[in-house]
């Protein structure tokens, strides 16, 4: 099964961890039939920034790193230790000493074991062109970028490193209300996509831009993910929710098609994004939305979402 998602760009500070945790958040709100999805986050960055989004406290000395998990997990798959950071989301940290040659030799076998345990595996990758092991194992690549020449150039370098065939989506981040950022956004959604088509890549998604906002930055300090922004009337919250809903929806459509599967997003989270979906897809009547998602007899229930936390 193809279910390993790489989040990477060869530039620091552009929101790789932010995209990783919020994509994991929405993927954990999918299910196959009645079975809720389980998501595993891996990293090849010893900063382990994902931990900042967890409300759980971890003793650094007790953390079992990726290297140890691989070496011991291949010998005894039932004894693989992970850290639960949110409902449906687990994480395995990376050691400052990196990954050993023994672990590298066993990585492929270990990955297959983890694929059987988790519906989706996301790699929060480091901001360099190093540590290629997890990059090679990935199936789909999501590239966060800022709307600057430096970031887009870094994206081009990363394409050469990761491979154009794996590129699934580009997520513009930290958009400011400046002429340069508006021009950068327009370039990504038009000319850049045309340039990708010219070299053989026609199906890349460019999401709406994530605005630079102290409100969103506070998610980190509050240990929150995007679906925990429950104020539906807040337009910023609605826009951010839609970006990760849309990214998840398109991703599971591709995963379903390529693996002959049937993952679906929890209907309450579809309903939460109803207004944005109808606006973005230019639906003039409610029945268009209801027919697309088969939600004729269901209404949005924010209390139910709150109870799921």
Image: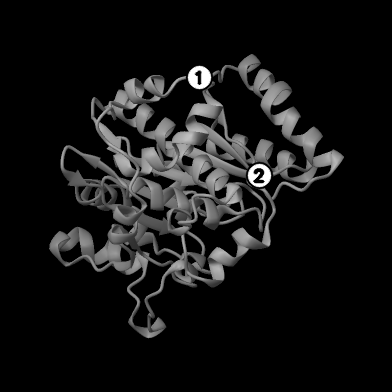
Few, some or many residues within 10 Å of mark 2 (<14, 14–19, 20+): many
Find disc 1 in the rendering and name its residue.
284
Residue 166 in view (yes/no): no
Q: CA distance from mark 1 to mark 2?
A: 33 Å
The disc at residue 145 is: 2
Q: Secondary structure at mark 2?
A: strand
Based on the displayed image, in which of its 4 quarters is residue 285 positioned? top left
Dot 1 and dot 2 residues touching (CB under 8 Å): no
Query: How many marks do you count on the picture?
Result: 2
Q: Residue 214: x, y in percent? A: 67, 62
Q: Secondary structure at mark 1?
A: loop
Q: Quadrant of the C terminus?
A: bottom left
Name the side, left or right, on which 109 lies relative to 253: left
Identify whether 140 is placed above or below 194: below
Q: Quadrant of the N terminus?
A: top left
Q: Residue 76: x, y in percent? A: 14, 63
């Amino acid at each position: 099964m193809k279910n390993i998602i790489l989040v990477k760009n060869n530039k620091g500070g552009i929101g790789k961890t932010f995209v990783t945790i919020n994509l994991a958040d929405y993927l954990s709100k999918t299910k196959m039939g009645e079975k809720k999805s389980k998501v595993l986050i891996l990293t090849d960055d010893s900063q382990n920034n994902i931990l900042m989004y967890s409300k759980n406290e971890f003793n650094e000395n007790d953390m079992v790193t990726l290297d140890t998990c691989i070496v011991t997990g291949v010998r005894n798959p039932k004894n693989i230790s992970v850290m639960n950071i949110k409902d449906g989301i687990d994480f395995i940290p990376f050691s400052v000493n990196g990954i050993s040659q023994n672990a590298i030799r066993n990585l492929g076998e270990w990955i297959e074991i983890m694929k059987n345990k988790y519906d989706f595996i996301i790699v929060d990758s480091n901001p360099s062109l190093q540590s290629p092991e997890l990059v090679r194992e990935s199936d789909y690549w999501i590239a966060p970028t800022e709307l600057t020449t430096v970031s887009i150039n870094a994206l081009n370098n990363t394409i050469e490193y990761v491979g154009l065939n794996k590129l699934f989506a580009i997520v513009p981040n930290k958009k400011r209300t400046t002429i340069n950022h508006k021009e950068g956004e327009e370039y990504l959604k038009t000319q850049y996509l045309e340039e990708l088509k010219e070299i053989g890549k026609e199906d890349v998604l460019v999401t709406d831009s994530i605005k630079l906002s102290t409100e969103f930055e506070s998610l980190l300090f509050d240990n929150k993910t995007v679906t925990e922004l429950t104020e539906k009337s807040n337009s910023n919250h609605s826009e951010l929710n839609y970006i990760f809903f849309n990214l998840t929806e398109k991703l599971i459509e591709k995963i379903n098609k390529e693996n002959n599967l049937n993952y679906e997003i929890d209907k309450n989270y579809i309903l939460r994004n109803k207004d944005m979906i109808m606006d973005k897809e230019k639906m003039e009547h409610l029945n268009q939305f209801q027919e697309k998602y088969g939600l004729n007899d269901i209404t949005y229930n924010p209390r139910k979402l709150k109870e799921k936390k």
